[in-house]
Amino acid sequence: MTLLIFVGVLLGAMMLGLPIAFALLVSSLAMMLLMGGIDPQAVALQMINAADSFALLAIPFFLLAGEAMTAGGLSRRLVDFALALVGHRRGGLGYVAIVTAILLSSLSGSAVADTAALASVLMPMMRGAGYKPARAAGLMASGGIIGPVIPPSIGFIVFGVAGNVSITSLFLAGIAPGLMMGTALAVTWWFVARGEEVAPLPRKTWAETAHALRDGLMALGLPVVIVLGLKFGIFTPTEAGVVAAVYALVVGMFGYRELTFAALPGVLLSAVRTTAAVMFMVAAASVTAYLITLADIPAEVGALLEPFTGSQTELMLAIMLIVIVTGTALDFIPTILILTPVLMPLVREAGVDPVYFGVLFIINCAIGLITPPVGTVLNVASAVGRVPLGTVTRAVVPFLISQVVVLLALVLWPELVMVPLRWLR
């Protein structure tokens, strides 16, 4: 009964147009009223305690790194490097989008930021070259959701805090699945782009390719620094956020000299606004998670999933189905914060590795970003690329299916996650 009231109030508040963070608070207050009365002091205390986390300090720094990366010219140089590598192939700009998406994912960790950067740079180029705008926007959106999977990942940070799982292990475990997602997109693009009547771009000379590589070396150095620093224990994920932010600012201001002191306040303000929105959502969802625990909803969900607990594969399939359905209605961060405290006790009891579960869970939540009706990344690709949302939604279907196939493969063969993780550890 408590679960039905929570879901009903949450969906009702969202249908009325309330922002998700406020909808979560309203549904939490409804649960609290059902359980014996509203205690404003408990709500405020829970929100403050949730935001007061050292690990969550990584979020503003990674967001700042993403903003500095775009304003400082790092994103554009990654595009130029990808153009030199694969731009001359048939459907080359699509492959450029995929390669750039993987490279951007290793810098910002935000699907929305990566999609906006991709679409703003490549959509005019793809439209001018004759590609179908809706298909191009669908590819951008699908490439953007690799952002929460390849480190650094804001999603892994939030999940690690909510589920008490090693964020460093999550970062390292996300590398191989993220590359698999990119490979699946490339295969899918090869199939769908065969009908595009677009002439390939001229092949770059070795000198031009070498120049693009030299020009992009400072941008390409950031993911190397982060991964090696985490692998060898030089810094924690939170400290990695600081390193990323300082690196992007220094390279943008003094390396490429495109980020000026006059533009710096705008970069900082944009990062602050995004951080405020994310942290308020984290604080609001923490109240929901607290009340879900008090109402013993994890036990109710465990009872529903009990028929599947005899097999880890069947249990993971059932959980992934629940997550993907939830992701169609909720945004990325709320899905993590609401479902993590519900599912983690069941996962641990079944003997599933928490890091392995976390990788699949985040991939699933990322897929929800391109799944209607919410589809945050779809909206970003539509707005930045100036393509109607309905046409982007239809065009994204083949790429969405390819990402679901990757998720299914990871459920059936856990070694695809755990073997690379053991090597990276």
Image: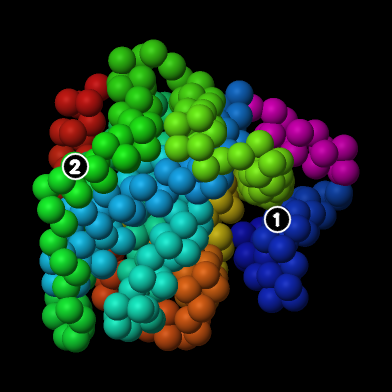
Amino acid type of the residue tagged 2 in the rendering:
Ala
Mark 2 lies on a secondary structure that is: helix
Nearest to N terminus: mark 2 or mark 1: 1
Of tags 2 and 1, the one toward the viewer is 2
Q: Is residue 273 left or right of residue 311?
A: right
Q: Which mark is residue 123?
A: none
Between 100 and 325, the residue placed more toward the observer is: 100
**Which residue is pictured at 16% across the width and 57% down the height?**
204
**Which residue is pictured at 87% across the width and 37% down the height?**
41
Q: What crowding class fits label 1: few (fewer than 14 Cα within 10 Å), some (14-19), or many (20 or more)?
A: many
Q: Is residue 320 left or right of residue 375?
A: left
2 and 1 marks in contact (CB < 8 Å): no
The answer to whether any part of residue 60 appears in the image is: yes
Q: Which mark is residue 21?
A: 1
The residue pinned by badge 2 equals 210
Q: Is residue 133 magenta?
A: no
- Report the magenta residues as a range: 39-53
